[in-house]
Amino acid sequence: MIGFRPEIQALGGYTPGEQPQAGKFIKLNTNESPYPPSPRVIRAVQQAAESGLSRYPDPMGNAFRYRAAEVLGVEPDWILCGNGSDDILTIVTRAFVGNGQLLRLPYPSYVLYKTLAQIQGAWSEEISWNEDWTLSAAFYADSPQLRLVFLPNPNSPSGTLVSHQAIGDLASRLTCPLLVDEAYADFATSNCLDLVRQNERIFVSRTFSKSYALAGLRFGFLVGQPHAIAKLAKVKDSYNCDALSIAGATAAIDDQAWLRDNVAKIIATRQRLMAGLDALGFASVPSHANFIWTRHPKRPSAALYDQLKQNRVLVRYMNYSKWGDGLRISVGTDEQIDACLALLQSMV
Ligand SMILES: *Cc1c(COP(=O)(O)O)cnc(C)c1O
């Protein structure tokens, strides 16, 4: 090999959900929005494109920070912009976790956290959820090697939510930073944004990829206390967000009426999907996100996945060695979900 670090040679690498050619499949596998974004976002991106791509963008994305601060009820210097929230997770890992140190994540959850630790030459500790998807006692245990804890909330693939109280409790027992990854929080009944004020070790990340229907734009952000945000800004690429995504995300967060509407539609369809799965005898986990984790007591999930795919419906099949397998079905439009349910009905 040509001199790759051993950590990189050993990497399995993150395998993203399949992105087949547009139109061929009903795509319920990567938790994108089935609806287009707010028209105001498109206009803002167009305007930004016309008014000067020859210049570098604002390195801190201040237009976004000012508007987002108003919407979220913090000050602009509490916000760090990222090229998707994956960029935020990378920045935070690089800032806190060094070679040989330890990062914690729940299992099963978002696989990227583990990859980020591996790239750092760090260890990751995957702690299984309790059967009922609450945090196990081991997740609360502090240790001197522990440098960062990731908690996706709501979690993927389960769609379950850890309570505000439990997260406050967790942070008070840990001596390292806790990043609450709120990629799906807009679909949930609670979030932890207010905890950031109470504890400098709590950070909250958000993305525009799910509830704002902007996965293709690549924009996410972190909320933390200003002194920590200033240090994290030193770790990021100088121009980590481009002029188009800053303009688009600013218009998106400005259109909260659109967001409320979009989230309401998705939650209504989520209920329709849940009821449909129940009627077919599936065991599904009640979800706070834009997807449902489910399995059928009699039919293997892998076979159901294959049959759906043959019929041009793409869902996510997940197989966790220590936990078991299942299907994660993203909430699409009512028509897409009805088509998926009709196919499942013919299979079970
Ligand atoms: C989708 C997702 C992200 C990544 O979002 P991007 O902003 O598109 O990078 C982060 N965390 C979780 C748990 C996700 O499901």
Image: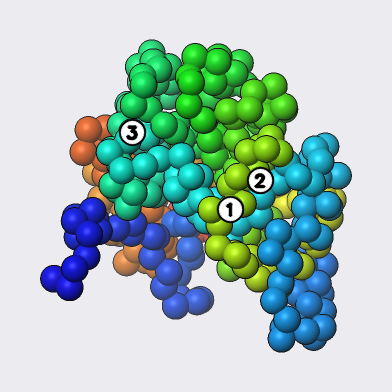
User: Pointer 1: residues within 10 angstroms few (<14), some, or many (20+)?
Assistant: few
Which residue was labeled with disc 1? 234
Cα distance between the residues tagged 3 and 1: 22 Å
Which residue was labeled with disc 2? 230
Q: Please state which of residues 235 and 133 is positioned toward the viewer in this rendering.
A: 235
User: Pointer 2: residues within 10 angstroms few (<14), some, or many (20+)?
Assistant: some
Q: Where in the figure is residue 219, as x and y percent of width and height?
A: 63, 59
Classify 137 as above or below 222. Answer: above
User: Pointer 3: residues within 10 angstroms few (<14), some, or many (20+)?
Assistant: many
Cα distance between the residues tagged 1 and 2: 7 Å
Q: Amino acid at mark 2?
A: Ala
**The N terminus is located in which quarter?**
bottom left
Cα distance between the residues tagged 3 and 2: 24 Å
**Circle number at residue 162:** none
Which residue was labeled with disc 3? 102
Residue at x-position 63% and y-position 38%: 228
Q: Which of marks 1 and 3 precedes in the sequence? A: 3
User: Quadrant of the rendered structure where residue 122 is?
Assistant: top left
Classify 187 as above or below 46. Answer: above
Q: Amino acid at mark 1?
A: Lys
